[in-house]
Amino acid sequence: MQQECHGGAGLRSTRPRRLPLRFRDELPAPPPTIEEPPPTVLRRVILYVFNSFRTSVNKFGIGREYRHRPSYDPDAFVSVDQLSNVPSDHPSISERADHSTGSLFPSQLPPWPWKNMSIWRLMSWKMTSTSGLTSEAQVTRLVSEVLKAKDFNVDDLPDNFNTHTEMTRFDTSEATLDPTDIFQTDGWRESAAEILVPTREKNPGGNGQSFTVQGFHHRPLVAVIRAAFSEASSRWFHLTPFKRFWKSPLTGQEQRVYDELYTSDTWNKAHDELQKQKRDNGCKLEWVIAGLMFWSDATHLAQFGNASAWPIYLFFGNQSKYTRSCPTTNACHPIAFIPSVSL
């Protein structure tokens, strides 16, 4: 019995003894090793410099904010008479400049191919007359729209002026143009358009049956854009977008005004991205955006009968909506005629 007790005591003494956790001293871990950083490569940095500015507000508290300085202000060519039916004695900047040079309206170029505005107004009255007889209404229209027009000058009419000669010149004007001329390349063309017509038959492609439409008259879109920017009315085009704002005269707080396409965020962002593009061809011209607006609707061509057409028109968002909606500004460009088909 004594031997067994001594043996049991010996076994208990071999167990390892550990201090309680609260009495243990744990050394902190060593800091991590510092790795050598890879060699830094300098990236190419492109610096864009913008000539931004804000205009002062007008009497209505309306101002503009430009990110890019415009080459000119097209609103300077718009007179008060073009924005209101009330007569005004305040001419536009272009009118004041023209009067200072001694000429009445030299900036008002006549539509091609007329020599001057006087001949164009007289011939336009003749071609748009509703009847061959000179009625009282036509004579009144002649006086109000031609003789009393600001850009009409009787001295512009030559002594040997002849209506038949001017009409012949107008009919043969396109034949005298160079084939590469801007006003020659935007002429009408006839092509065959291919469309897909849904049918009740099973089609693996699911797009319908192909159908060719003959007699589709259209004008090249790029040529129409070039011709529009070459016309005299392009001086009203806003080439540089901006943001319009209204400043309260009481609180001084500013509020964004959305009224035109060229004042939208989308147009400003697209113009900004365009200016950042690299120019490798050495072009020094101004890079601008042409805003294309398409519109189409069927129209009746005669008071009696079933003659009709379905034209497609093109408007430019660079023009103000107040100028674009005026019929006398020639802002509408027909680019295609959809033919009628019977399936």
Image: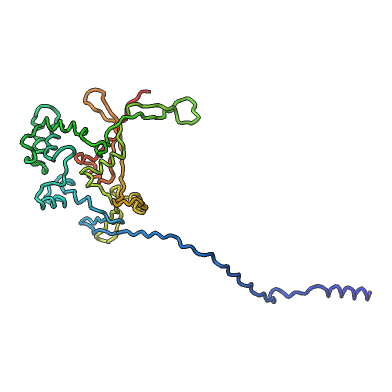
Please tell me whether residue 3 is drawn above or below residue 236 in the rendered image.
below
Report the number of discs.
0
Residue 55 lies, in percent from the top left, at 25, 58
- Picture quadrant where residue 168 is located: top left
Name the quadrant of the C terminus: top left
Residue 217 lies, in percent from the top left, at 30, 30
Outermost residue, left side = 159
- Picture quadrant where residue 37 is located: bottom right
Name the quadrant of the N terminus: bottom right
Nearer the observer, 215 or 21: 215
Nearer the observer, 181 or 108: 181
Nearer the observer, 280 or 337: 280
Applied colour scheme: rainbow
- Residue lying at 11% horizontally and 39% vertically, measured from the top left: 118
Would residue 128 be visible to someone looking at this image? Answer: no
Please tell me whether residue 232 is drawn above or below residue 246 in the rendered image.
above
Residue 75 lies, in percent from the top left, at 21, 50
Residue 252 lies, in percent from the top left, at 27, 61
Q: Is 273 on the left or on the right of 118, as rendered? A: right
Would residue 119 be visible to someone looking at this image? Answer: yes
- Picture quadrant where residue 161 is located: top left
Q: Is 40 on the left or on the right of 219, as rendered? A: right
